[in-house]
Structures are given as structure tokens and as C-alpha cells.
Image: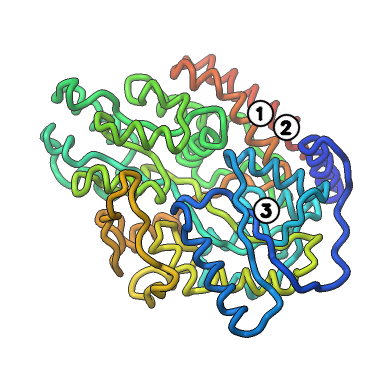
Amino acid sequence: MPRRLTALLALLLLAACTGGGGGTPEPAAEEKPGTIVVASGRDVTGSNGVRQRLIDAWNRAQQKAGSQYQARLVELPGSADEQRSQLLGALQSGSARYDVVNLDVTWVPEFAEAGLVRALPDDLVDADVIDPVAETARWDGKVYAVPFNSDVGLLYYRADLLRKAGVEEPYVPEGFTWEQLRWHITTLDDRLGAEDFANGWTTQLDAYEGRTVNVMEAFATAVPGLRLVDEDGRYMGAVEQLRRGVREFVRRVDPAYVSPDAKKHDEAESTSEFTVGRTAFLRAWPSAYPTLYRAFGKRLGVAPLPGRAVLGGQNLAVTTTSERARKATELIRFLTGRLSERCLLEAGFAATRGSAYGRSPRCPAEISAAPAPSPTGEPDEVPRGDGGRPGLSDLKLRKALERAVHRPRTPLYGAFTQTLITQLGPLVETGSADEDELDRTARRLDEALRRALPG
């Protein structure tokens, strides 16, 4: 009964998102040659990015083999939240014939439970896939989506500002904590003038998924081993856990330390603020590295995020209605294979496979191509090699992925994240709360999550 109830709730949510209740799509009856359409969000590696180049490589191999199949990438506009709504609407209504969809790791249970994507062969997620990343592929004991590229929160910092303020190296040592970060910010504020330093740190606190990520990183740091849902996605949190998490989150949004503009920033805006040059620390994904290195060069430092970092990334799934499901699965096997993952890593993504890191075979020239030009039109001068990027080695990135924590895995993730964003909005605005307000917020959040995630 709980499983059937969860499935029903997921379908009700789909109807609410799409404006209609079309029911679970029927699987296609037979395999038809033709174009495999891959729907995905924007490729952060730019136009003709690495995802497109990988698909081009697969198409060349198909053409050489005389295959009747080709693949075509369709990039969806808007934020991740908007892309989710577009995919839900298209698959539920049948308004778009997508064969492969690139899902955020948090969407997999929802799409699987609603019958919008197919179960895939277990061997697509083998022992080479990094453990926390591999967990995002499964729901209800089956593989529904294969990890394509991963993500994890990192701490970027201005090494030159810390040096100028007299902070001793290493500026961000092993085991660096949020308390130490606040101490650094206080030191910078005391010792540097306004021409050099304006803000301690910045992040993504606008009312979208970025806020949820920041909240969950605070919660996971404050409550080791935190689990807000069980394996079926049903709520199992407690007020005391939420109180500790809310207290840690408030410390992170204290106006004495965080940029006043962070409350309205997404990833692009927070990165832009940091590149202006008067903000000392930035929480961002690995994909921000090329832009930041071009701006600061050796003045840029990169470290694991203090406390716990949230796992991000996207997984590839085959739609239930695909008329080319067998060949689409073959395409996914290529796109998520060892060589493809190395190409994704070299292009700036976090690879999902352990074999991609370190001295693995380099990405073939016909896929890696020339680095994309910077926004100024100048060549991309970000060094690449077996050791990774300066300050962000392959080993450092892989270790960060291995320690990353999941957001709650539930078919009702959309309801969960919207609840969190809404309930903690007042704290983002004020950046402060006394103990009574912390207690009231935790209790309101607990009640709202119990309504959003029946258990």
C-alpha cells in the first residue's frame, strides 16, 4: 500500500505540473530506425560543447557502420526547475517525442515512479561508477538512469587577498570548517580596505534549487548521517534535527559574513559577483572553474567545501514511449562509458567514473577539439593535464564526490524542494533569528514536510 500510495501521489503531482492528467504513457510496441532525440539542459561547456561532440562521435560511428540511426541533441531553455516542468509536460502529454532525457539526479525517483522512463540493464552502472554517484541511478531496486556527469559543491577563494591580509598558508587546510572561514572573513575585514574587500562569501540563495542545495549542505553538516526520507521517499525527519539544521543555516546567511546580494543570486550571478574581485569566498560547482581561472589565474584557490557538500549532476534515461529504446540504450552506454567520461572531465564536468581521474587515456582529439574561446574571444588558457587543473586536481575532485551527500530521494522531490525554499525564505531575508524563532521555524518546516511527503 505505501508504494502504491506514493505512485498515486507522484502521478497527481505530474497532473498538477502539466495541466492535464494523461496517465502513464504506454510503452512503444516496436523498434523503429530513425533519429534518437536527446533532451537536455544547457551544456555549461558552451556552444558545440562536449555533449554535442560526444553525440557527433557516436553519429560518425553509426554512419561508418551503415546504421539507420542517428542522434540529435535538443537543449531545453530556462533554469533546472523550468526544464523539469518542460520534460514532465512533454512526456506526460506526448507533445514531444524524446527518446533520451538528461535528468537532474533528484528527478530520477519521480520520473521512474510515474512510469515516464524505462528500467535499464544493471550493467550500465558498474563498479567503476563512484559510489554516491551510482546511488542516484536506482529507484525501487532497478536502474532507471545512468550517471552522465556529476557535480559537487566546492569552495573557491582569493588566495591573494588572504596573503595580503597576513593569513598564514595553507589558507584552507585539510578539515577546514565554517568557523575557520568566518574567522578568515573577520581578519580580511579588519586588515583590508574597501578597495580590496567588500564581502566575505557569496553563494546561491535565490528562491530556486540553489537555495535548497545550500540548506541541505547546512543541515547535513549540523546533523551527521541526516536522513529526511526513507527508501520509499516517505518523510522521517524530526523537529530536533531540523532545529539544528536551521541554526547552522542561519549562521551561514548572517549578514556579517555573506554578501547582501546572495539572496537574489543563482550560479551565474554569484560567479559574476566573485569575479568582480572584492568577495573572498564562493560556493560553486566545478563547472565555474574555467571562468574563475581565466579571471584570477594563480590568485585563485580551490578547496573542498567546509562541512558536507551536496552531490549534483545529471543522469541519462530512456523514455517509456521511445520507439528506439534498444538503440537509445546503446547510445547511453557510449555516452557514459570510460572514454566519454574522460572527455567530460577534460571539458570541465565532474566525471562519474573513477577510471576517468588520474592517468587514464586522454580524450581523442576529434572529441576534445580545440578549447572553446573565452567570453572575450581570447583562447581558453586554463591548463589541462593528467593532474587536473591548478588548485583543483583530479584527486581533489574525486575525493569531494566520494564524500558528497544526497538530497532527499523521493518521487515528490518537487514538493520537498518547494517546501524548503518557501519555509526558509524569511531567514534568508533577515539572516538572523533568536532561539524562539529557530524553534518555530523548525516546527513549521516539520509540519509542512509532513504534508508534502506523506509517510
Please give left or right for residue 370 compared with residue 411 in the image.
Answer: left
The quadrant holding residue 22 is top right
The residue that appears at 49% across and 46% down in the rendered structure is 310
Residue assigned mark 2: 450
Q: Secondary structure at mark 3?
A: helix
**In-image side of 183 versus 286 (left or right):** left
Which residue matches tag 3?
Answer: 108
**Disc 2 residue type?**
Arg
* Rendered image: mark on residue 319: none
What residue is drawn where x is 67% and y is 44%?
84
| Among numbered discs 1 and 3, the one appearing first in the sequence | 3
Q: Amino acid at mark 1?
A: Asp
Crowdedness near tag 1: few (<14), some (14–19) or many (≥20) residues, C-alpha within 10 Å: many
Depth check: give the residue in front, 215 or 45: 45
Quadrant location of the C terminus in the rendered image? top right
For label 3, count other residues whose C-alpha is less than 10 Å away and answer few (under 14), some (14-19) or many (20+).
Answer: many
| Mark 1, secondary structure of its residue | helix
| Residue 109 in the image, given as x and y percentages of width and height | 70, 52
Above or below for 231 versus 77: below
Which structural element holds mark 2? helix
Spatial CA distance of label 1 from label 2 is 6 Å
Three-letter code, disc 3: Val
Judged from this view, the residue extending furthest toward the bottom is 65
Residue 217: give x, y in percent of width and height: 48, 40
Mark 1 near mark 2, Cβ–Cβ under 8 Å? Answer: yes
Q: Is residue 82 above or below residue 393?
A: above
Residue sitting nearer the eye, 244 or 445: 445
